[in-house]
Amino acid sequence: MAILFAVVARGTTILAKHAWCGGNFLEVTEQILAKIPSENNKLTYSHSNYLFHYICQDRIVYLCITDDDFERSRAFNFLNEIKKRFQTTYGSRAQTALPYAMNSEFSSVLAAQLKHHSENKGLDKVMETQAQVDELKGIMVRNIDLVAQRGERLELLIDKTENLVDSVFIYIIVSLLCGGFTWPSCVKK
């Protein structure tokens, strides 16, 4: 029960990687990276006796391969930690980096975190809670964006209504001045 392989990539360009053991992880990872959409997302794929977990944020993919009995929450805790460390260390440089540009520095971070998250079950609850808080923050941001969009649509509707009311008053005044207006019986004077 362990994390076997971890990689950080921009699209299909691998920036850093580390393998816990031997295998054809790199070839399989390249195939999976080609299928991952570039929008922000997190997902788990299953193949044979392995699980492929990934987080994609700002076109950077954080992916790990685990045994099929490894807990999904632990894998995503690992990926969130890797993502945080990678973003802190490299920031926007990752958007233009060459293949394996960060591997010499960051593979040791991957190795240390791989070992830590594969062996340490005691931090699971804290990490899981942190992951849930981060997920809730993301949901709240999306909801606030939706409310703001609705507010903009309401503002547009209010403006159109005010313009319509102004047009009706202008019509009534012009009609009264021209003498061709009769007050509708359904409207109170």
Image (cartoon, rainbow, N blue to C red):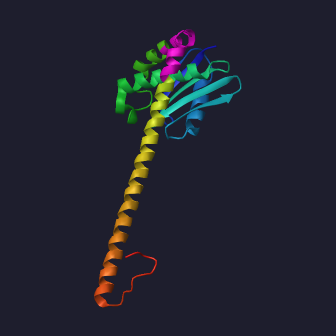
Q: Residue furthest bottom?
A: 179
**Residue 101 pos. (x, y %):** 40, 27
120 drawn magenta:
yes
Q: Residue at x 36, y 87 (%)?
A: 181
Q: Name above or below for residue 158 compared with residue 32.
A: below
Is residue 23 something that shows in the picture? yes
Q: Residue furthest right?
A: 48
Q: Residue at x 46, y 18 (%)?
A: 107
Quarter of the image for the N terminus: give it: top right
Magenta segment's dominant SS is: helix
Report the number of discs.
Answer: 0
96 drawn magenta:
no
**Residue 150 pos. (x, y %):** 43, 51
**Residue 4 pos. (x, y %):** 59, 18
Q: Nearer the viewer, residue 100 or 7?
A: 7
Q: Name above or below for residue 116 compared with residue 43.
A: above
**Residue 160 pos. (x, y %):** 38, 65
Boundaries of the magenta span: 113-130
Q: Residue at x 61, y 27 (%)?
A: 52
Q: Name above or below for residue 88 compared with residue 141.
A: above
Quadrant in which residue 35 is drawn: top right
Q: Nearer the viewer, residue 110 or 129?
A: 129
Q: Is 35 on the left-hand or right-hand side of 59?
A: right
Quarter of the image for the C terminus: give it: bottom left
Q: Residue at x 30, y 81 (%)?
A: 173
Q: Residue furthest front?
A: 189
Q: Name above or below for residue 181 compared with residue 87.
A: below
Is residue 14 something that shows in the picture? no
